[in-house]
């Protein structure tokens, strides 16, 4: 993590305006058509740079196995060098976060409780510990605020079904959550700014 921050700092300080322009151009041509707010694919805006870089390396290394990962993401990142991946991570981090979406108030209350307190009876630790007070993300723990409900549920199911390598704890937590609890926590997260 420290090394990542260092490298990123270095890239940012030495990056010229034309590098930033090139990255924005690259992102618009290759990524934004799927990752815009209306596509139904995950929001990347305001995501932590550490998580963005790490997940891109994981797609490159073939460590995520969902159908969407293998059919849609792998080939998009295969040929991209690390400097460009860092540039992309920084670029998406700088974009304004997606707007929150309202949901069923009862689900939001249940979801907030799971997020802040976990589910002790099912040995599920409070999400807030790693994902932050406002679900803003911390380092390689991703931002979850205003993330699409369906993507949050899908990822929790992917962890539960063992389709995501290179993470230690999410499989354990998600395997303890029922479908209803996933729905509630995803509804809560989508409602956060
Ligand atoms: C054809 C549509 C498509 C294109 C083009 C695309 N992506 Fe994706 N991306 C997806 C899908 C679908 C997922 C979810 C995959 C999964 O199940 O892990 C994803 C996941 C991601 C994730 C992980 C998000 C998270 O919160 O876990 C990152 C980061 C990402 N993409 C970055 C990029 C970048 C950078 C580019 C351009 C080089 C790009 N994507 C191009 C469809 C696309
Ligand atoms: C011990 C720290 C920790 C706790 C507690 C935790 N998470 Fe995570 N979570 C992570 C990390 C680290 C990742 C990234 C894993 C990876 O790289 O695939 C992650 C990934 C996720 C993702 C995928 C997001 C994306 O953009 O792909 C979701 C959704 C998620 N967590 C939801 C939750 C929920 C809901 C809870 C509480 C029930 C929770 N997490 C508890 C550390 C944690």
Image: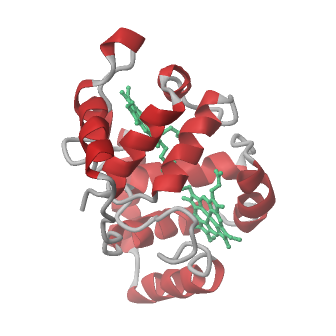
Horizontally, residue 75 falls left or right of residue 162, namely right
Give coordinates of residue 185: x percent, y percent.
37, 41
Q: Work out whether residue 168 or residue 116 is closer to the camera in this orientation and state it.
A: 116
Return the residue nearer the eye: 38 or 11: 38
Report whether residue 117 is seen.
yes
- Observer-nearest of 113 and 89: 113
- Most distant residue in the left direction: 133
Residue 162 versus residue 9 in the image, above or below: above
Instruction: Give the quarter the ligand 2 occupies.
Output: top left
Residue at the image point whose x is 40% and y is 57% from the top: 49
Instruction: Look at 56% across and 68% down and name the residue there.
Output: 40
Q: Is residue 40 left or right of residue 116?
A: right
* Residue 136 against residue 75 in the figure, above or below: above
The N terminus sits in image quarter: top left
Q: Is residue 135 left or right of residue 179?
A: left
**Which quadrant is home to the C terminus?**
bottom left
Q: How far across and how far down the image is residue 184, in percent?
A: 38, 41
Residue in view at x 56 percent, y 49 percent: 55
Whether residue 3 is visible here, answered yes or no, is no
Residue 174 location, x and y as percent? 51, 28
Q: Residue at x 31, y 71 (%)?
A: 99
Say above or below: 90 vs 129. below
- The answer to which image quadrant residue 71 occupies is bottom right
């Amino acid at each position: 993590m420290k090394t990542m921050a260092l490298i990123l700092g270095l890239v940012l300080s030495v990056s010229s305006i034309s590098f930033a322009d090139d990255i924005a151009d690259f992102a618009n041509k290759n990524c934004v058509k799927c990752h815009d707010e209306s596509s139904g694919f995950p929001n990347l805006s305001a995501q932590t740079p550490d998580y963005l870089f790490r997940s891109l390396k994981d797609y490159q290394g073939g460590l995520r196995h969902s159908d969407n990962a293998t059919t849609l993401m792998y080939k998009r990142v295969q040929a991209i060098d690390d400097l460009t991946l860092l540039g992309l991570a920084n670029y998406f981090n700088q974009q304004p976060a997606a707007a929150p979406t309202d949901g069923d108030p009862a689900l939001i209350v249940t979801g907030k409780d799971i997020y802040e307190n976990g589910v002790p009876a099912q040995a599920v630790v409070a999400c807030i510990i790693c994902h932050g007070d406002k679900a803003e993300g911390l380092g390689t723990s991703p931002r979850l605020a205003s993330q699409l409900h369906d993507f949050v549920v899908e990822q929790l199911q992917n962890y539960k079904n063992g389709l995501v390598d290179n993470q230690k704890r999410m499989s354990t937590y998600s395997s303890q959550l029922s479908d209803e609890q996933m729905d509630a926590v995803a509804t809560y997260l989508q409602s956060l700014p």
